[in-house]
Amino acid sequence: MSARHFDRTVVRAVRRAAEIPQAEVGAAVDAADSTVAGWELGSSVPDQEKLPGIARALRKPLDELFPRKGAPDLIDLRCDAGLYRYEVARFIGTKSDGPVAAAENGVRRLKEKYVPKLAAAYGVSEKALEQAQERSFGNVVEEDGDESVAAAEADEHPRALGEKISFLLEHSYPAGTVPGDGEIAEAVNRHAGAEVVTAKEVETLRTGAGDADGPGPVVLEGLAEFFGVERMYFEPDEAVARQVYQGIRVLLASRNGTIGRVRARGLGPEGLSPEVLSLLTDLQAEFEKQVGSTDDE
């Protein structure tokens, strides 16, 4: 384990310079202000799992505030995601953290089906997780230059219209509230003020079995209004599609508290344009509206 270095004097200096109360730092990591005072005095040190939260509270990058020497193993990746071991079972769908504990201790490797789930929870690529696992077993593995999920999956964004619709349905609605083809068709027709698409035609669009020329502008506008995005998302623009896909992944990771090592450079050299940022804001608002309506039921 290549634990991060906690320097109490640096933490205290950064906090005081930013005029951040100890209570605010403590609240960010579920600790009393007296506990934070103890960290700064050197009478105790925080768990490695709390360092990401402390860095966020002090508005400093994790690597800058708490540097690490050497490449991370599985324990390091989990701690960098701000997760205690007992919290990981829910991500891989097991009753206990036994599989993760065994892998972290170099006893038994993770089952293949757990790798993508754990990588997503930690905010790293599957390759980075597998490399970290090898280090947990005492093997020397060089660290790749970029471990971000966005960079690792930059070429997997949805391109076709059907893929984009399916992606929004999968990621923009809470479980149990995903709308059907009929509901989507009704919303599009309501927007158009006439019947311009049927449930069967929506299914055809969603599955990608439709006309190569695609639907007309009025249908695209109706779809955009229904999903709470701008019409440009459905246009065949590779650059826009890539940015939106990667941006949504960042939003999801942030919402789930697993932003981990997702980095800005994974969003492409040009960053996110104002138009795409606006689109992502609309998506987040739509998701929160759906969550709110579900909670009220």
Image: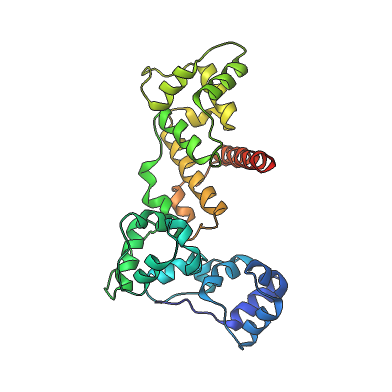
Residue positioned most to the front: 95
Q: What residue sits 52% from the left and 49% below the top?
A: 252
- Residue at position x 46%, y 48% in the image: 267
Horizontally, residue 146 falls left or right of residue 4, namely: left
Please, which residue is most extreme toward the left here? 139
Percent from the top left, x then y, of residue 185? 53, 20
Q: Looking at the image, how many numbered discs can be counted on the residues? A: 0
Q: Quadrant of the C terminus?
A: top right
Question: Residue 228, percent across and down?
Answer: 59, 32
Horizontal and vertical percent for residue 172?
Answer: 54, 39
| Residue 63 appears in view | yes
The answer to which of 71 and 275 lies nearer the viewer is: 71
- Out of 55 and 211, give the one closest to the viewer: 211
Residue that sits furthest to the top in the current view: 194
Q: Is any part of residue 124 visible from this angle?
A: no
**Above or below, comparing residue 154 to residue 97 in the picture:** above
In which quadrant of the rendered image does the N terminus lie? bottom left
Residue drawn at x 54%, y 76% as measured from the top left? 47
Up/down of 71 relative to 241, above or below? below
Camera-side residue: 201 or 161? 201
Q: Residue at x 37, y 54 (%)?
A: 116
Q: Where is residue 15? Give x, y as percent.
A: 67, 74
Q: How is the image coloured?
A: rainbow
